[in-house]
Image (tube, rainbow, N blue to C red):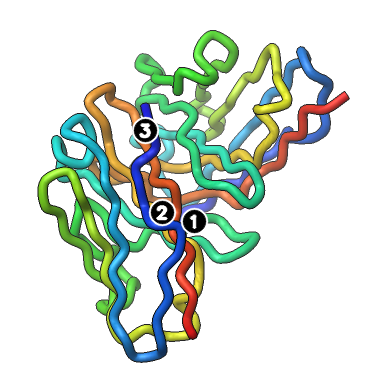
Amino acid sequence: QSALTQPASVSGSPGQSITISCTGTSSDVGGYNYVSWYQQHPGKAPKLMISQVSNRPSGVSNRFSGSKSGNTASLTISGLQAEDEADYYCSSYTSNTTYVFGTGTKITVL
Amino acid sequence: EVQLVESGGGLIQPGGSLRLSCAASRFTFSSYWMNWVRQVPGKGLVWVSLINSDGSNTRYADSVKGRFTISRDNAKNTLYLQMNSLRAEDTAVYYCARGGIPGTIDYWGQGNMVIVSS
């Protein structure tokens, strides 16, 4: 199973909105509404930010939102804040009843 | 809140074996699927294996199939990963992670480092 494709880095100024893409295939992202997004700060465990394409777990800021079109999912962070600077990973359930993660995107707040 | 604590990592020679454990608490362990995910420091997350709630169904990434075995003891609220024939490329931080709502890995442990080196 090949990793889902994400941009290596995205940057934005405080208050701006940024979007991270996550491209897979019809066997993973395109085939199921089971895309998740994780935030990972250096030296820390990943934290679930979005589940099932667009659902925010309790406690996650409403500045984070998710969507999907075809084989590409997206995470949008609005009102960018310094604390959002981290690595972000998408993941998808697959047709092999396994999971696959994205290549990861480093978000830099300018 | 959900707690997952990994243990058993360390330095091991190529070809050797190691068993990771993950102690779960603050949720009904026997009701949830569980996963192992690994991450080479500075690199991305890679899914390794999953097991269903009663242990009857397991899946593995191609890179570890035939070498790693996932198991669980619901009476002890503990998840395991038996790693045999270890290779240098298995060096990584190994995370224990809970399978939550369908298609979602929701809670993660703090990670446990495994270093395969002579």
Evaluate whether label 3 is on the same chain as label 1. no
Chain ID at mark 2: A
Contact between marks 2 and 1 (CB within 8 A): the answer is: yes
Which residue is under mark 2? A89
Residue A77 locus on image (x, y percent): 30, 75
Q: Earlier in the sequence, mark 2 or mark 1?
A: 1
User: Residue at the right extreme?
Assistant: B118
Say which quarter of the image contains residue A94: top left
Vertical relation: B81 (above or below) B112: above
Label 1 crowding class (10 Å Cα cut-off): few <14, some 14-19, many 20+? Answer: many
Vertical relation: B11 (above or below) B5: above
The answer to whether residue B118 is left or right of residue B77 is right
Query: As rendered, which of A3 and B77 lies closer to the eye?
Result: A3
Q: Quadrant of the C terminus of chain B?
A: top right
Residue B28 locus on image (x, y percent): 40, 42
Measure how far apart labels 2 and 1 are at the Cα level.
Answer: 9 Å
Label 3 crowding class (10 Å Cα cut-off): few <14, some 14-19, many 20+? Answer: many
Which residue is under mark 3? B33
Residue A30 locus on image (x, y percent): 15, 40
Which residue is under mark 1? A46
Indicate the secondary structure of the residue bearing disc 2. Answer: strand
Q: Which numbered disc, 3 or 1, marks the residue closer to the eye? A: 1
